[in-house]
């Protein structure tokens, strides 16, 4: 592929979006710290898959096709023989609704991609690659291959980590409440760092999202409703604050 441009730059106003191998490599390098942070999360998913009776091949194939740790863990919680197919699909759909706003947020890049560039990028888009790419866009980045580079590295690491976790789960039985099971929460918290724009922009939307989610959880509302309610309430407040006159100057 080389460092040559893979697709001609496409203009959008004053911004020219490009797609280069150099951008893809830069995205892969930027994602390397996240690979280490994903290790406990991937191991937990593999361990849980083994404990629910999935073979090593089934666990790795699920990871390669689904590539969504939260959805995989939720689906495994519903796992039975025979599997409640409709319940698993619905649960995974609901928890992945959080990804719906990612497309519009990344539209300056995604709208200019076609063919394998677009579909490969969408297939490997996850929370982590979204967070890094939004931060890259805010810095003025215009190489859309950066997003694919992050996604490809994370996808590869995820499949291998789940496989390693499955092997671990066959050897060691971890008790409920083991610190390793905190990995999912830790991984999602780490994504917030590059998205934080300071108290002035993000304090109130983030605070509202957390309060709503925690309040519904304490009231016993079943998952993933607290997560979704918190996310949408925070997003709504953020959109309202951004739309107010003079918001761009604050």
Image (cartoon, rainbow, N blue to C red):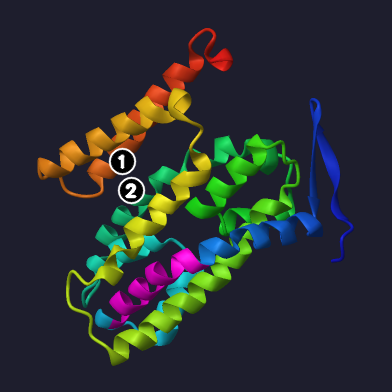
User: Chief secondary structure of the magenta span?
Assistant: helix
x and y percentages locating residue 125 in the rendered image: 55, 54
Residue 94 got which mark?
2
x and y percentages locating residue 51 in the rendered image: 25, 81
- Of residue 61 and residue 106, the one placed in the foreground of this image is 106
- How many numbered circles does the render carry? 2
> From the image, which quarter does the N terminus lie in?
bottom right
Position of residue 20 relative to residue 37, above or below, is above
**Magenta range:** 36-50
- Of residue 51 and residue 83, the one placed in the foreground of this image is 51
Badge nearest the viewer, 1 or 2? 1
* Res 56 visible: yes
x and y percentages locating residue 151 in the rendered image: 59, 59
Question: Residue at point 46% right, 78% down?
Answer: 60
The residue tagged 1 is: 228
Question: Residue at point 21% right, 74% down?
Answer: 80
């Amino acid at each position: 592929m080389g460092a040559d441009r893979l697709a001609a730059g496409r203009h959008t106003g004053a911004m020219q979006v490009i797609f280069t191998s150099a951008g893809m490599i830069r995205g892969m390098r930027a994602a390397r710290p996240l690979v280490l942070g994903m290790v406990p999360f991937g191991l937990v998913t593999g361990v849980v898959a083994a404990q629910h009776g999935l073979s090593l091949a089934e666990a790795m194939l699920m990871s390669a096709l689904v590539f969504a740790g939260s959805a995989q863990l939720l689906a495994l919680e519903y796992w039975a023989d025979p599997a409640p197919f409709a319940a698993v699909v619905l649960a995974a759909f609901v928890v992945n609704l959080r990804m719906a706003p990612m497309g519009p947020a990344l539209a300056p890049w995604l709208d200019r991609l076609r063919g394998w560039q677009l579909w490969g990028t969408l297939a490997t888009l996850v929370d982590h690659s979204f967070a890094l790419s939004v931060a890259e866009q805010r810095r003025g980045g215009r190489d859309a291959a950066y997003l694919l580079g992050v996604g490809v590295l994370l996808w590869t690491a995820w499949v291998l980590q789940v496989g390693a976790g499955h092997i671990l789960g066959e050897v060691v039985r971890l008790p409920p409440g083991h610190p390793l099971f905190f990995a999912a929460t830790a991984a999602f918290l780490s994504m917030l760092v590059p998205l934080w724009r300071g108290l002035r922009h993000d304090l109130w939307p983030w605070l509202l999202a957390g309060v709503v989610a925690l309040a519904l959880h304490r009231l016993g509302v079943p998952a993933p409703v607290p997560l979704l309610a918190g996310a949408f309430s925070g997003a709504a407040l953020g959109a309202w604050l951004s739309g107010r006159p003079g918001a761009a100057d604050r």
